[in-house]
Image (cartoon, grey):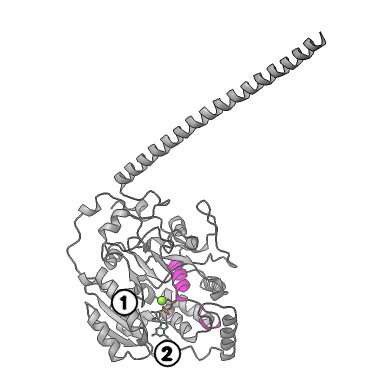
Amino acid sequence: MQICKVFLTHFRKILLGSLLLCLIAQTCWVAFVHHQRQLKLDSYFLERSRVATSKYDFVRKRESNQKLKLSSNTYSDWLLDEPRETTLSRENATLLMLVRNWELPEALRSMRSLEDRFNKDFHYDWTFLNDVPFDENFIEATTAMASGKTQYALIPAEDWDRSSWINETLFEETLKMMEEKNVLYGSSKSYRNMCRFNSGFFFRQKILDQYDYYFRVEPDVTYFCDFPYDPFKVMRLNNKKYGFVITMYEYEDTIPTLWEAVEEYLEETESQDVDMETNGFEFISNFDFFGKSFGVVDSNSDYNLCHFWTNFEIGDLNFFRSEKYIKFFEYLDSKGGFYYERWGDAPVHSIAVSLLLKKDEVIHFDELGYKHMPFGTCPSAHYLRLQERCLCDSNHPDNIDLNVISCLRRWWKDGSGKYFLKHNS
Ligand SMILES: Nc1nc2c(ncn2[C@@H]2O[C@H](COP(=O)(O)OP(=O)(O)O)[C@@H](O)[C@H]2O)c(=O)[nH]1
Ligand SMILES: [Mg+2]
């Protein structure tokens, strides 16, 4: 009897255990089958979405990995069929290079690139400026490289050298202090002359009196694409006074008190030359976040440090020659910041343009590929790159347009917006 009882208890335990095991096995099996089905579904949808992406990319003729579409109307599928402009009349303009004799190889590289990509069809004059006389080698080689007329001018010492009232002791102290702080060109005297010259004197050179527009070219730059238009003509026909391709944040260490001087200028002139309703003040003063993950660069003043990168610029000389620009420049110059700090022509031009011009008088030439070390810009529209025979990769890390240090998105938001939002053709 006792044996029977023990046997029954064990039997029950074994039965229950087996049932439990069966249940677990079944649950595992169901989960496994479900998982397999899910995997199949996932790969099915992945494949479908790949097909759809490539299909629609083919239709749209542009890359799928470009998260943000840059401005312009150049996403058209039919760009290659559009006839190119054939009437090549010239504007009253010159290509302009401030350069040193020893930079000849780099100057020739820039010239070759711009001639190939643009000027060979137009033959605009090349104007060269220097603080010492150009040597024969330089003149001979650049004249040979140019498709247009070349002319050379010596900058008068009073437009180049620092003013006599600059305190030499203070100046030398600044150079030392900036060198210790590793500020870019912080200890260079000639760089300061250059920045001041480009801020307030280039447009006053006699040789430029005959022109309305200039296109600044620096040694060792590359133009990645054929120009789809004459930018001077685009400027004149659309009443643009300043054109840029790259905009970014400035190193604050070079301009600690520039904004203070601008504020004083605004106060002292009672902002009489400034129309806050129409100008680009927001572009240089707005600190709001924009986009999903991009913050702002820290600034100790109300200037957000955005500036146009002036190694490429196309401008209306009449704006720079105007009384209001000269007044603005002279005010800043009187503070001595070109020497006691290291104010660059880029923030000076950019602040002037943003205060004194209407924001719609400024144009972002987003179809023009360009590189000046260490940054470049490359058109993001696939068919435009083909049409312009570009040699650049818009997804390359050197392409600054959507980089954190670029101000382009601020320009879209607070400047005159994306081109394609405002123009139909
Ligand atoms: N004639 C002359 N040109 C200069 C001098 N310093 C700079 N430049 C020119 O000014 C422009 C800006 O100088 P660069 O060395 O390219 O400075 P970065 O572009 O700011 O690195 C270039 O076109 C230079 O050739 C100078 O002392 N004399
Ligand atoms: Mg340069």
Residue at 28% over, 91% down: 136
The magenta stretch spans residue 275: no
- Residue at the right extreme of this rendering: 2
Instruction: Reply above or below: 21 against 170.
Output: above
Magenta-tinted stretch: 338-357
Residue 20 visible at all: yes
Closer-to-camera residue (48/416): 48
* Residue named by callout 2: 158
Using residue 263 as the reference point, say whether residue 148 is left or right of it: left
The verdict on residue 342 being magenta is yes
**Residue under circle 1?**
109
The amino acid beneath tag 1 is Arg
Can residue 277 be seen here? The reply is: no
- Distance, label 2 to label 1, CA atoms, is 31 Å
Is 50 placed above or below 383 here? above
For this rendering, which residue is in front, 319 or 74? 74
Q: Residue at x 52, y 73 (%)?
A: 265
Q: Main secondary structure of the magenta part?
A: helix
Which residue corresponds to the image point at 36% horizontal and 61% vertical from the top-left?
378
Is the residue marked by circle 2 packed among few (<14), some (14-19), or many (20+) residues within 10 Å? few
